[in-house]
Image (spheres, rainbow, N blue to C red):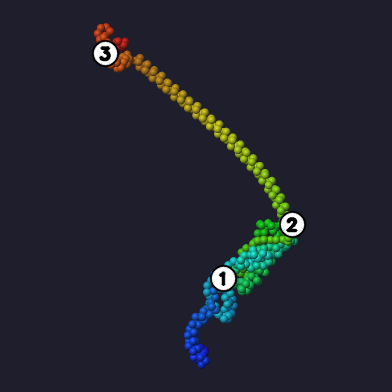
Amino acid sequence: MPKPWEEFRKKAEIIDPRAVFKFNHIFPLLIPFLILYMFQFSFVYVKPNEYGIKQVNIGFKKGIQKKIYKAGLHFVMPFGFEVMHRFPRNIQVFELTNSPTTAARGARIEKAAHIQTSDGFFVDVDVSIPYHIVDPYLVITTIGPGKLYEDNGIVPRTEAKLKEALGEMTTEEIYNSFIRVEKAQKAKTLLNEELKSKGIEVVHVLVRYFRYSDEIQRNIEEKKLKDQLVFTNQSKAKASGEEALVRKVREEGEARIKVKLEEGKAYVIKKNAEKDLYVRSKKAEGDLLVKLAEAKKTEWINQAYQKQGSEKLVGLKMAEVYKGLDMIMLPSGGAHGINPLDLESSLKLFGVTEP
């Protein structure tokens, strides 16, 4: 046992022997707490959304160290030998507004920027400025630790740059969103030129709201209402002209449709007439061919009857008359007798003579 503890034990034994027993049992229980106590002062936790920069106060490498520590536990010499400075690495927001309830949660809030326009009027402008630390080493060496990047960095420079950029606009131009965005972009550029060397980068300059004095505001609003009325009347007139043009186009379109429909009907009638004419002409041609064929047939039959052997053909045709008779009684003898088995006599009977 170390000498100090031994002396403490002897003194405790002289005062009360039971204290030695208590000490021997309690001291081992205190060891974890002593280790935890030492651990707490020897390690620093850098969060995922933070940078860590170590400062050595006593030792060989005294001063701010260039190494940037990321998330995790990092050893530092306790009792002031070393200090770990932590800076946020996520987006921070600086708000200039006279309505704190409209500001982003956790943002640094200052009064609205009081800006004089190029035509001599004053306007209060609510601005949101998201920014982030890109180089914590530059921040701590040029501005300082802790929240000094706000107090001595972004805060004192912002309104001056806003006045420089937004002050170029006239009273009317502030109402022009395109010009307003252009000047806000210029303010962002001016701020980054000032803060880049200090390890800070402005992401956006967002003009959220602006307000003149009540009298100027009222005059501007009245003028705007008059301008809007003129614009509304112009728009109505233009809309009426467009409606008339639409009606004209629609009427012309409907007329063209009717013309096309009539042309289509006439075309259909014409095609139907051509079809009927074609059918009738082809039918007439067919009937003519049939009649010509029948006439030709009759002509060929007549010619056949006029050639050699036609008398026999006539006799055979006349002989076919007998096919429909079941029985006939005719004289078979004498000058007028008929013998159906005697073909020569039958032919003579019908006037058919041999050639």
Amino acid tagged 1: Glu
The reply to whether the C-beta atoms of the residues labelled 1 and 2 are less than 8 Å apart is: no
Circle number at residue 219: 2
Judged by depth in the image, the label closer to the viewer, 1 or 2, is: 2
Name the residue: 27% across, 10% down.
330
**CB-based contact (under 8 Å), mark 3 and mark 1:** no
Q: Is residue 218 visible?
A: yes
Instruction: Pinpoint residue 302: horizontal percent, then vertical percent.
Output: 37, 16
C-alpha distance separating marks 2 and 3: 141 Å
In-image side of 352 versus 139 (left or right): left
Q: Please state the horizontal and vertical placement of residue 269, each as a whole percent of the image.
A: 53, 30
Task: Quarter of the image for the C terminus: give it.
Answer: top left
> CA gap, disc 3 to disc 1?
141 Å
Residue type, label 2: Asn
Question: Which residue in the structure is indicated by mark 3?
Answer: 340
Other residues around mark 1 within 10 Å, as few (<14) / some (14–19) / many (≥20) = some
Between 44 and 217, which is closer to the camera in this rendering?
217
Q: Is residue 9 left or right of residue 182?
A: left
